[in-house]
Image (cartoon, rainbow, N blue to C red):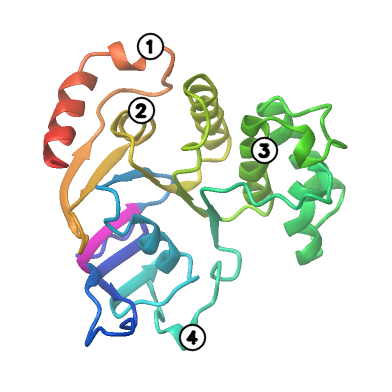
């Protein structure tokens, strides 16, 4: 049932790709997948490798079409047919992918302001907001550095700021911290929570890391093996703000971790 507070709702979503040579038909990647996410909610999704998590985000971001089902943005049905795709849904949905995708020939400040330039929204007010975001993740002073001069963690922060720059109400994140070391990952998670608290965006965060899903999320969805569907849902009762440096020691974390781990077997 649709919730009046739902920012995004998915109903019975399904996806299969065109058959490859030698195939009469391809297997289903997603099947009968349904969930909703509320305004300002931080929703995390975990699932086995190859279960279709990236495919799901590609459909939600309108980068790829669906084979069936329905998606609603704030109660309005969105056409999921491939011929009618509208990537980013008129800047209402931001997408942070696994790669930072920074333009190597542009400086950090040019990279993070690029969406605003495209939209004709780069002005004194937006630059002031941008400086606030950069300060929040300790990137002040690196404005004129090129991507190859930045650490992996700094590039990840820049990628996140670039998405936040044009202020989309919903942000999709596809394992954005998977390629960095454990210490940097914890810092990036803390940076993300700090930025989320500043603007309280609606976030759908896909990860294979159970601990990360619990540490960041208000709610954790568990996907089945392909074809993916939601098989379990957990509300994270641990209060915010959260200090991720000792989060794993907090009461309730260990039990939820073991529960989700068993559900993924």
Q: Is residue 16 above or below residue 255?
A: below
Whether the residues at callouts 3 and 2 have beta carbons within 8 Å, the answer is no
Tell me how far mark 4 sits from mark 3, CA to CA.
33 Å
Whether the residues at callouts 1 and 3 have beta carbons within 8 Å, the answer is no
Of labels 4 and 3, earlier in sequence is 4
Q: Quadrant of the N terminus?
A: bottom left
Residue at numbered disc 4: 84
Q: Residues within 10 Å of mark 3 (few under 14, many from 20)?
A: many
Image side of residue 238 versus residue 260, left or right: right
The label on residue 215 is: 2
- Check disc 1 and report its element: helix, strand or loop: loop
Of labels 4 and 2, earlier in sequence is 4
Tell which tag, 4 or 3, sits nearer the viewer: 3
Residue range highlighted in magenta: 31-37
Tell which tag, 3 or 2, sits nearer the viewer: 3
Image side of residue 128 versus residue 256, left or right: right
Residue in the picture at 21% in, 60% down = 226
Tell me how far mark 1 sits from mark 3, CA to CA.
25 Å
Residue 232 magenta-drawn? no
Q: Quadrant of the C terminus?
A: top left
Of labels 1 and 2, earlier in sequence is 2
Whether the residues at callouts 4 and 1 have beta carbons within 8 Å, the answer is no
The image position of residue 38, as x and y in percent, is 35, 51
Residue at numbered disc 3: 155
Residue at numbered disc 1: 246
Tell me how far mark 1 sits from mark 2, CA to CA.
10 Å
């Amino acid at each position: 049932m649709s919730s009046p507070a739902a920012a995004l709702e998915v109903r019975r979503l399904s996806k299969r790709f065109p058959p490859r040579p030698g195939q009469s038909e391809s297997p289903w990647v997603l099947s009968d997948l349904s969930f909703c996410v509320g305004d300002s909610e931080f929703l995390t999704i975990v699932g086995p490798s190859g279960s279709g998590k990236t495919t799901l985000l590609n459909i939600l971001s309108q980068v790829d079409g669906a084979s069936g089902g329905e998606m609603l943005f704030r109660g309005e049905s969105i056409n999921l047919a491939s011929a009618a795709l509208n990537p980013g849904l008129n800047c209402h949905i931001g997408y942070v992918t696994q790669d930072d995708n920074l333009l190597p020939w542009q400086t950090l400040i040019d990279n993070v302001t690029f969406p605003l330039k495209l939209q004709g929204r780069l002005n004194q007010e937006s630059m002031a907001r941008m400086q606030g975001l950069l300060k929040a993740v300790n990137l002040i002073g690196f404005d004129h550095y090129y991507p190859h001069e930045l650490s992996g963690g700094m590039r990840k922060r820049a990628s996140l700021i670039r998405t936040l720059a044009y202020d989309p109400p919903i942000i999709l994140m596809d394992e954005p911290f998977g390629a960095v070391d454990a210490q940097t990952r914890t810092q990036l998670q803390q940076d993300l929570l700090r930025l989320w608290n500043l603007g309280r965006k609606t976030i759908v965060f896909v990860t294979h890391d159970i601990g990360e899903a619990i540490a960041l999320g208000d709610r954790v969805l568990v996907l089945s093996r392909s074809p993916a569907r939601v098989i379990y849902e957990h509300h994270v009762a641990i209060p915010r703000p959260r200090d991720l440096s000792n989060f794993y020691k907090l009461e309730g974390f260990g039990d939820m971790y073991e529960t989700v781990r068993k559900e993924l077997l």
